[in-house]
Image: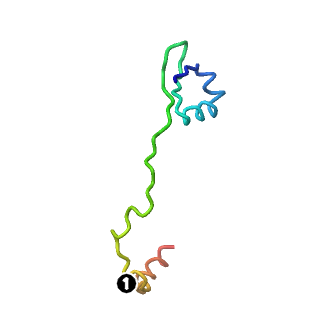
Amino acid sequence: MTRTVNIHEAKTQLSKLIDAALKGERIVIAKAGNPLVTLTALKRPKRILGLAKGRGKVTDEFFQPLPADVIEAFEDSR
């Protein structure tokens, strides 16, 4: 379903128009009856948990304290 609204109505009813677009309605915003833009919902990819499982490895080296010279470099940069 497509609904055409003028710019003034779009400004005053933006939240309602966004809700309608999220529900699948196509909103056309017009000026003086001439269509200018279309308001549609973005299609976001569905997030899949665990997609990168097994692709990386955290070794014990990761949990070792930082060397003194690295700590000093951070402290000197303040």
Residue 45: x percent and y percent?
43, 48
Residue nearest the viewer, comparing 49 with 72: 49
Residue 55: x percent and y percent?
33, 68
Residue nearest the viewer, comparing 12 with 40: 40
- At horizontal 55% and vertical 21% (from top left) the residue drawn is 3
Residue nearest the viewer, comparing 40 with 31: 40
Dot 1 alpha-carbon crowd within 10 angstroms: few under 14, some 14 to 19, many 20 or more: few
Give the side of residue 32 with respect to residue 66, left or right: right
**Image height check: is 36 above or below 23?**
above
Secondary element under disc 1, as helix, strand or loop, is helix
Residue nearest the viewer, comparing 2 with 6: 2
**Image height check: is 25 above or below 69?**
above
Give the side of residue 69 with respect to residue 34, left or right: left
Residue 26: x percent and y percent?
51, 27
**Image height check: is 37 above or below 58?**
above
- At horizontal 49% and vertical 32% (from top left) the residue drawn is 40
Residue 22 lies in what quarter of the image?
top right
- At horizontal 40% and vertical 80% (from top left) the residue drawn is 62
Location of mark 1 (residue): 61
**Furthest-left residue in this view:** 55
Give the side of residue 56 with respect to residue 7, left or right: left
Residue 16 lies in what quarter of the image?
top right
Q: What amino acid type is highlighted by mark number 1?
A: Glu
Residue 60: x percent and y percent?
38, 84
